[in-house]
Image (tube, grey):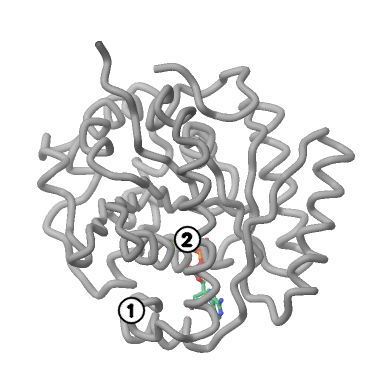
Amino acid sequence: MTATNSTMSIAIVSGKGGVGKTNISLNLGYALSQLGHPTLIMDADLGLANLDVLLGISPEYNIQDVITKDVAPRDVVVAINQQGLDLLPAASGIADLVDLDEDVQSLLLTRLKPLFHAYDYLLLDLGAGINPTVLSFAAMAQERLVVLTPEPTSLTDSYALIKILTTEHGVKNFQVIVNMTDSTQEARQTFDRLFAACHHFLGIKIQYLGLVRHDKAVTESVRKQEPLVKWAHRSPAALNIKTIAESLHKQRSLLAHLIAKSSVLRVPYGAHARSYSQK
Ligand SMILES: Nc1ncnc2c1ncn2[C@@H]1O[C@H](COP(=O)(O)OP(=O)(O)OP(=O)(O)O)[C@@H](O)[C@H]1O
Ligand SMILES: [Mg+2]
């Protein structure tokens, strides 16, 4: 009998760079661990990794060492807090690994999968844009959180990313976080525009997950190299991220039966309405 899966995998993606994916990955992971869920953040921005910088740590090993030096995945993991938040760090500036070829990527995933099963959530912090490695990681996750800001360029780039994932990778489920916004109304309007374009041109209904306010505490936490939800846990942005963590927690309970039948990361190109594929 095969064991059932209970890990929910979530890729954090964006069309435009610098919209807050890495900060959201780290703090969402932190908030999920505080809700009692062991969570692994994988730094999947293999070319320009920076979760280690946000945390002010210098990991001994990184994901690339799993392939190039045969290091065991367990030995690469770094514990971030006592509540079960762990990081799988990547290396920066290794151009060869930005675009993993399919064989290398599948070898890497085969080696990482047993590790993933130890967690309730796997968050993939991806690079911006539409390079093949980003797209395939984004398509393999069960859920995708599209981060955008109210800027028009962020909107058009988000649409371009969703379009390519839908039309070329058969992915239909996207949840949206509007970051760096000044009001609930602005966030809703930003989402509504993206929703309308996706519905009209692609025939899909994207979901609103929440907003994160523009908050100088975020920048300060980056300077201090401390997670925002730890360092300024009552700041507006930290409270927003905790609310999003609670929504994901509810989703995981509601989707438990689908997650149980899924792979942590599916082989792409399925015809499933949601990315919960058979193992
Ligand atoms: N809610 C916010 N309020 C204020 N500043 C923010 C907020 N979210 C992110 N930032 C700032 O925006 C910058 C970019 O954030 P981050 O590195 O998380 O983006 P990213 O999407 O991961 O970028 P990249 O595409 O390069 O990986 C950081 O300097 C961060 O401090
Ligand atoms: Mg980033």
Place residue 8 in its image quadrant: top left
Indicate left or right for 172 with 269 as reference: right
Give percent across and percent down for residue 7.
35, 38
- Determine the secondary structure under disc 1: helix
Give percent across and percent down for residue 114.
21, 31
Indicate left or right for 84 with 233 as reference: left
Mark 2 C-beta closer than 8 Å to ligand 1: no
Residue located 32% across and 65% down the image:
34
Nearer the observer, 2 or 95: 2
Q: CA distance from mark 1 to mark 2?
A: 14 Å
Residue located 17% across and 43% down the image:
65
- Determine the secondary structure under disc 2: helix
Q: Earlier in the sequence, mark 1 or mark 2?
A: 1
Question: What residue occupies the far top of the structure in this picture?
Answer: 1
Give percent across and percent down for residue 263.
39, 26
Residue at mark 2: 245
Place residue 191 in its image quadrant: bottom right
Indicate left or right for 127 with 34 as reference: right
Task: Inspect the image, locate mark 2, and give the three-letter code of the amino acid beneath it.
Answer: Ala
- Dividing the image into 4 quarters, which one contains the C terminus? top left
The correct choice, above or below, for 94 with respect to 268 in the image is below
Residue at mark 1: 230
Give percent across and percent down for residue 62.
21, 50
Residue 145: assigned label: none
Residue located 34% across and 29% down the image:
5
Q: Residues within 10 Å of mark 1 (few under 14, many from 20)?
A: some
Q: Residues within 10 Å of mark 2 (few under 14, many from 20)?
A: many
- Dividing the image into 4 quarters, which one contains the N terminus? top left
Nearer the observer, 123 or 16: 123
Nearer the observer, 22 or 5: 5
Which circle, 1 or 2, is nearer the viewer?
2
